[in-house]
Image (tube, rainbow, N blue to C red):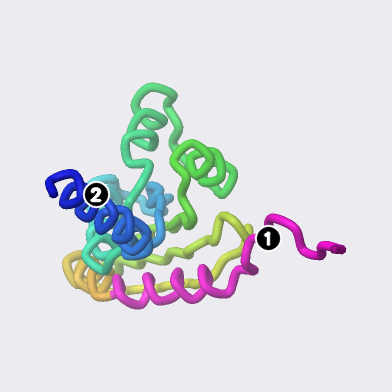
């Protein structure tokens, strides 16, 4: 009776594995933003990146590549990240999407704009822009964008053509 019990448990676990794989959200890389300001806004740049990653994580996305980005900044001295870097990191991390953007401070106004790129389709799928005289307000607005960002990614993910494999036609 015991072997049958263990077989039943193993069978049930095997059935649930594909369901748990589907429950994961898209894998996303959040890259450091470019900065445009006459003053040092590197701390705000770091916060914006963290807020976007947190908002996406809270919405169900899987954040990838943080250690790779950190290594590129600290060990390789990379200061600006572009789509080429996003593709290189995605290949290493298996990511589906990348977030790239910029932060600008002109006078008392702080602007944050970013885009989400579908790395498999090699195309931007969404653009975001937040502006305020308060950095905290911009960060709050970034946090509130998590669900919208995830919806755009899921829509793009679902719009991709299904992968094909196996025999299409077989003559008997």
Q: Residue 73: where, in percent of width, then height?
A: 38, 31
88 over 1 or under it: above or below: above
**Magenta segment: does it hold 135?**
no
60 left or right of 121 in image:
left
Q: Which circle marks residue 135 in the picture? A: none
- How packed is label 2: few (under 14 Cα within 10 Å), some, or many (20 or more)? few
User: Between 135 and 146, which is closer to the camera in this rendering?
Assistant: 146
User: Between 91 and 85, which is closer to the camera in this rendering?
Assistant: 91
Q: Residue 172: where, in percent of width, then height?
A: 85, 63
Labels 2 & 1 near each other (Cβ < 8 A) = no
**Count of picture labels:** 2
Q: Residue 92: where, in percent of width, then height?
A: 48, 36
Magenta stretch in the rendered image: 145-172
Does any portion of residue 44 appear in the rendered image? no
Q: Which circle marks residue 7 in the picture? A: 2
Does any portion of residue 92 appear in the rendered image? yes
Q: Secondary structure at mark 1?
A: loop
- Give the CA distance from mark 2 to mark 1: 33 Å
66 over 164 or under it: above or below: above
Q: Residue furthest right?
A: 171
Q: Which circle marks residue 164 in the picture? A: 1
Residue at image position (29%, 54%) is 11
Between marks 2 and 1 in the image, the one whose residue lies nearer the viewer = 2
């Amino acid at each position: 009776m015991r072997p049958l019990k263990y077989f039943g448990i193993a069978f049930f676990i095997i059935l649930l594995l594909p369901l748990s794989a589907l429950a994961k959200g898209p894998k996303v890389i959040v890259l450091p933003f470019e900065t445009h300001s006459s003053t040092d806004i590197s701390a705000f740049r770091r916060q914006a990146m963290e807020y976007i990653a947190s908002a996406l994580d809270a919405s169900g996305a899987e954040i990838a590549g943080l250690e790779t980005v950190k290594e590129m900044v600290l060990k390789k001295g990379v200061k600006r990240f572009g789509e080429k870097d996003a593709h290189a990191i995605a290949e290493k991390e298996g990511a589906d999407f990348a977030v790239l953007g910029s932060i600008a401070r002109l006078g008392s106004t702080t602007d944050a704009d970013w885009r989400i790129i579908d790395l498999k389709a090699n195309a931007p799928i969404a653009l975001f822009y937040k502006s305020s005289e308060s950095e905290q307000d911009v960060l709050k607005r970034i946090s509130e964008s998590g669900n919208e960002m995830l919806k755009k990614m899921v829509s793009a993910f679902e719009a991709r053509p299904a992968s094909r494999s196996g025999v299409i036609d077989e003559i008997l």
